Image (spheres, rainbow, N blue to C red):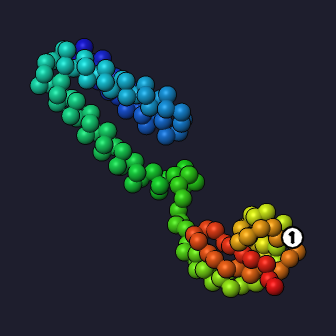
Amino acid sequence: MGQAIVVLLIVGFLMIAAEVFVPGLVLGLCGGLCLLIAVGLSYAAYGMLTGTGIFAAVGICTLGGFFLWLNLFTRTPIGKKIVLSEGLSSGDAVERDSLVGSQGVALTALRPAGTALINGQRVDVVAEMGFIEADAPVCVVVHEGMRIVVQPLQ
């Protein structure tokens, strides 16, 4: 019985680790089920004290392995390809804030949303009111998060 418990524990941890490379939750669920069966068998075969000890060890190893994986996986070649290594810069937000008051040209018809060329940049914009024809001159009046509101120039 002891060998079956050890085999189930090893297989369970290996299946959970393999879930990283074969997503779909099937291996992770099967691995978790192996761990639960191993803990249940240890309770049945060795009693409450040993079963609780194995349950605690599985929990500690699972959490420890997870945090170790979080720290080490991003340094591996596969992890570097999967994980975003740079944060988003706030430079875009500063540039967009400086667009208020800028003038440009509507590249598409704004009904009310569309695209405009402002300061040499293509930006998604929304017309403040109504419809603005393509190639009409526009002026930026409001910047709300990612939303840029324009109105036609008079």
Q: Residue at x 71, y 72 (%)?
A: 128
Residue 34 visible somewhere in the drawing = yes
Residue 33, image x, y percentages: 37, 24
**Residue placed most toward the observer, 42 or 113:** 113
Furthest toward the left, the residue is: 49
Residue 121 visible somewhere in the drawing = no
Q: Is residue 84 above or below residue 6?
A: below
Q: In the structure shown, which secondary structural element does the residue marked by tag 1 occupy? A: loop
Quadrant of residue 95 in the image?
Answer: bottom right
The quarter in which the C terminus is drawn is bottom right
**Residue placed most toward the observer, 122 or 145:** 145
Residue 13, image x, y percentages: 37, 32
Label count reads 1
Residue 19, image x, y percentages: 48, 36
* Left or right of 69 in this view: 79: right
* Residue designated by label 1: 133
Residue 44, image x, y percentages: 19, 14
Callout 1, which amino acid?
A: Glu
Q: Residue at x 31, y 24 (%)?
A: 36
* Left or right of 30 in this view: 24: right
Q: Residue at x 44, y 31 (%)?
A: 28
* Left or right of 66 in this view: 80: right
Quadrant of residue 35 in the image?
Answer: top left
